[in-house]
Image: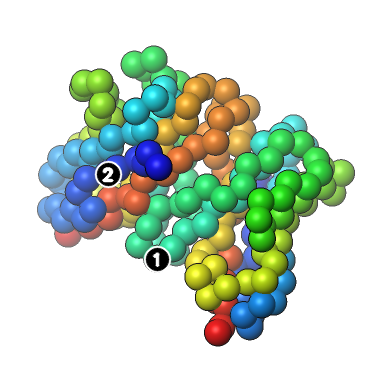
Amino acid sequence: QKEVEQDPGPLSVPEGAIVSLNCTYSNSAFQYFMWYRQYSRKGPELLMYTYSSGNKEDGRFTAQVDKSSKYISLFIRDSQPSDSATYLCAILTGANNLFFGTGTRLTVIP
Amino acid sequence: EPEVTQTPSHQVTQMGQEVILRCVPISNHLYFYWYRQILGQKVEFLVSFYNNEISEKSEIFDDQFSVERPDGSNFTLKIRSTKLEDSAMYFCASSRDRDNQPQHFGDGTRLSIL
């Protein structure tokens, strides 16, 4: 069973659109969830870090965790061309290592 | 903003040779990691390192691999007798402490085995 599933996209939206990126996970014991952004030829850059259920907002970014359905989301408001990147969801295991999704490639068209 | 740095950015090595990938974690971080990303696949955990010893390792991290913190700033991944399938991006990461801390990644070393 795959630990984390993520729609690989690609996803293409016009500038200013609201973007929704989603992952599902298998183990209900997971409690720490992260979103990373990865530009081409760069390492994953931490965007959001959330614990348990609920929402966390940082500027144009909102991370949402629904533990009852084992579903995590990242919303990007007023998307910009500079948001074009691959977005990776990741889950922190009890052993302190990360399980990553496959990543969703996002393109924001000016 | 402090960052994780990795060298070299690209390493080309003949199959069967040994390779050492280097990382300088963020200076006040205590927990270090290596991950691997084969082209087109997920980022996969290899190993974590804390207090000068391996904390966890995945099934990928077999006897071919070793890690070391040779001094107060560097953290290295050694791959002995490289194979074609070792070709991948290797990412180093660090976190401030052991439990439930966010991990910060370097830009990776692209390893190409010929």
Is residue B27 in sight in this rendering? Answer: yes
Q: Please state if A1 lies on the left or on the right of A68 as rendered.
A: left
Give the residue at x 55% y 39%. A98
What distance separates the C-alpha of mark 1 from that of mark 2? 16 Å
SS category of the residue bearing label 1: loop
Please identify the quarter of the rendering in which residue B63 is found: top left
| Residue B54 image-quadrant placement | top left
Here the colouring is rainbow
**Amino acid found under the numbered disc labelled 2:** Gln
Q: Give the amino acid at mark 1.
A: Ser
**Where residue A72 sits: x, y (%)?**
73, 51
On the picture, is B58 further left or further right than A6? left
> Is B86 displayed left or right of A106 in the figure?
left
Q: Is residue B59 visible?
A: no
Q: Which residue is mark 2?
A: B6
Q: Chain of mark 2?
A: B
* Residue designated by label 1: A40
| Local crowd size for mark 2, using a 10 Å CA cut-off: few (<14), some (14–19), many (≥20) | many
User: Horizontal and vertical percent for residue B92?
Assistant: 36, 40
Question: What's the chain of the residue with tag 1?
Answer: A
Q: Residue at x 81, y 44 (%)?
A: A54
